[in-house]
Structures are given as structure tokens and as C-alpha cells.
Amino acid sequence: MITVSEAFSILQNNLPTLKEENCSLLEARKKTLSQSIHSPIHMPPFRQSAMDGYAVGIHDKLTYEIIGEIKAGDAESFVLQPGQAVKIFTGAPVPDTAQAMIPIEKVTVTQSVLTVQSVPKLEDNIRPIGEQIKKGELALEKGTELDAAAIGFLAALGITTVPVYKKPSVGIVVTGNELLTPGTPLTYGKVYESNGVMLEAALMDAFFQEVARYAVKDDFESTKNTLQTAIEKHDVILVSGGISVGDYDFVAQALQELEVKTLFHKVNQKPGKPLFAGKVNEKMIFALPGNPAACLTCFYVYVLPTLKRISGQITQYEAMNSLPLEHHLSVNNSRAQFLKAKITNGKVAILSHQASSMLNTFSTANALVYVVDGNYDLKENELVTVYGVKN
């Protein structure tokens, strides 16, 4: 049995090779650039009005002759002599002969005569060509995760497709004879299956969209065949249940026959001790505990960082956050623990119902607090290691 840190190190050293693809801008949402993007144009591509007002040929008087109008999108230009002005709207092209732009709030107009309050300064309220970015300059660096603002920026540069790291497709294999589909009558000895939809929801929360679920009974051949199908079709496979040492836990044997290399099996932690990680042909396989809270804990701590890493995101396995504990906590455990917790007003509180089978407090948690094994006390306001579990 290995430690949590050893499990992190093993995963880090066995990540699959990153895959690349070209996507349309919307398809690239929440994906990571695999190459840097340079601007194909100046932005703005012309001298541009920063607001509604009047573009003027500056002279030493406070009155100007209005000779025309330019709206956003107009291609018409004017040659302004000193003392002449054109009415102009936000985003419209400013004539090359205009020397300043005066906001509409600072002028008065009588017929075709414009009166200003003071002599304007050169280039006032005019966005110069390339003010935001010049042609050939770096627009977005490799490794940038594309959010709405980044996508809008690229669209404004006329870019329609981008090179990104391909997000892995994920197959979820749920095992267990005791599982019933929610909505069917609950019979004695059965429980409703929740891990599959829970994992799919967690994947969708993290913007992993290519997900499929498979159900398998506790039978060796069925388990092996379903796992083989999932491995053939997906980049990452998540198995729920069947990885322990019971008479009807067939996952480990099936993975062995499918020549899945064991990276580790069993981690000195609670919940989630039975966790398995393996690899075959650049495919990653995680066999997660069947108990729901243990399953979700292992997903957030091990699976999600792995998925992010093989999607090109820069993320760490080790938690980088420490927060003060809201209350005293006594630790008495031979295994490291991931405790369901809630961050409020900059402090973190440990929640009730910590059993590996219980999701009720996990549903209100927004963090996991990691505590090392041993017998000791943590005092109120003492800093503890915190893993965030909600985006």
C-alpha cells in the first residue's frame, strides 16, 4: 500500500502523450491552446472613434463647420481642413485628416456649426491602429485555457479555428448486482445506482463532454468484455466498484487479463483505500471504490487532475491551498484522511457524516481537508491543507 504523495508521483510519471486537434472557436471552449496564436491583423484595423461625438481638423477657434457624418461600418471618408468637423459614432473609422475626437457631451450644435468648450488635444478619443494588438504580435500563449473572453478576442481578430489539446473521452463502467436504476421500484437488498450519473455530472462540471456509461453485473466474463469495449472506445476509463477483494469483485482480475499495467492498487487513505490506477496503450484506467463518497473523493483528488493534465492544463496533484480551521479537530487514524468540508468566509469547517457511503454532506461541501495519519489535535485557526471540489 502506497502513500498519497507516492500515488501522485506515479500518476505524474505515467501521463499519456497529449493529443492535438483543430477546433472551431465554440468547440474550443474550455480547451487549452496547443500552439501560441499571433494576430493576423491590427486591432483596431483603422483609426477608430472611442465614443459618439465629432472628429475635427484642429484650429485655434472654438467653432467648426460640420461637413458630414460617419457611422460605424461606413467606408466613406472625408478630407478635413482645419476648422471642419464630421459627426462620428462609436467604433466608426476616423478620417486620417482628423486630429481629435470631441465627445458629444462637450459640444453644442446650431445647424451646421459646432461649438466646443476648449481647443482639443491631438488624438483625443481616437483609438490608434493596432492599439489593442498589432499584426504579428502574440495574441494568446500556448497553454491558455479558452474562456468566453479569449474566444471573443480571437473572433475579433478574424480567427475561426484554433489548435488545442484534445480532451480525452471517458468511459464510466459501473459494476454491481445490487444496483437498480433510479425510478424503478426499490426491492429488498437493492440500492439505487448513483455513482455513474454522479461521475458523469462531475465530468460535465469540469467541461469533459465525451462521456459514456456502461453497466455490468458481477460476473467475470461480463466485466472483462465490458472493460475491453470501454478501453477500445475511450481514452480514460473509470470503473465504479468491484476493485476490492470480495468473492464477487472481478475488476482486478479482468484488468489483469486485459494486460492493463498496474500503476498502483491501494492507497493509505480514508476514504478510498482500494483505489486502482493502471495504463494500457496510452489509455488510463481508474478503478474507484463503490462507496459513493469514496468514489467522488478519489475522482476529485486523482482523476480530475489527471484529466486536466492530459488536456494540456497546468495543474498540480498536490493541493496548493491552506486555510484556517474554523474549529478544533481531533485526528485519530492510521490512514491519511480526506474530510468533507465547507469553506465559508475564508475558514474551513469539517462536516458531519464522513462515512465513505454518505453523500448527504458531500452535496453541500465545497472542499476536502487533507490530514495526515496519526493521533493529534488541530486547533482552531490552525492552517490545514484544502482541496477544492467544485468549479
Image (tube, grey):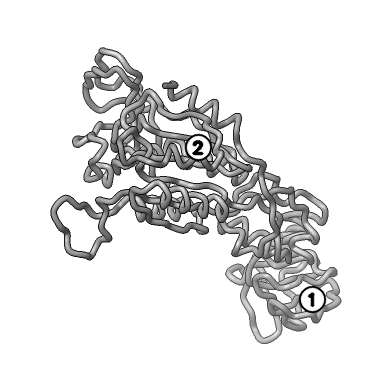
Pointer 2 with pointer 1, Cβ within 8 A: no
List x then y, in percent, for residue 143: 65, 44
Label 2 sits on residue: 256
Q: Quadrant of the N terminus?
A: top left
Q: Is residue 87 above or below residue 157?
A: below
Asked whether residue 85 is in view, the answer is: yes
14 or 297: which is nearer to us?
A: 14
Q: Is residue 282 left or right of residue 202?
A: right
Label 1 sits on residue: 84
Q: Secondary structure at mark 1?
A: strand
Amino acid, disc 2: Gln
Q: CA distance from mark 2 to mark 1?
A: 84 Å
The residue that appears at 52% across and 58% down in the rendered structure is 210
Q: Secondary structure at mark 2?
A: helix
Of tags 2 and 1, which is closer to the observer? 2
- Badge 2 crowding class, 10 Å Cα cut-off, few under 14, some 14 to 19, many 20 or more, is few
List x then y, in percent, for residue 237: 49, 47
Amino acid, disc 1: Gln
- Badge 1 crowding class, 10 Å Cα cut-off, few under 14, some 14 to 19, many 20 or more, is many
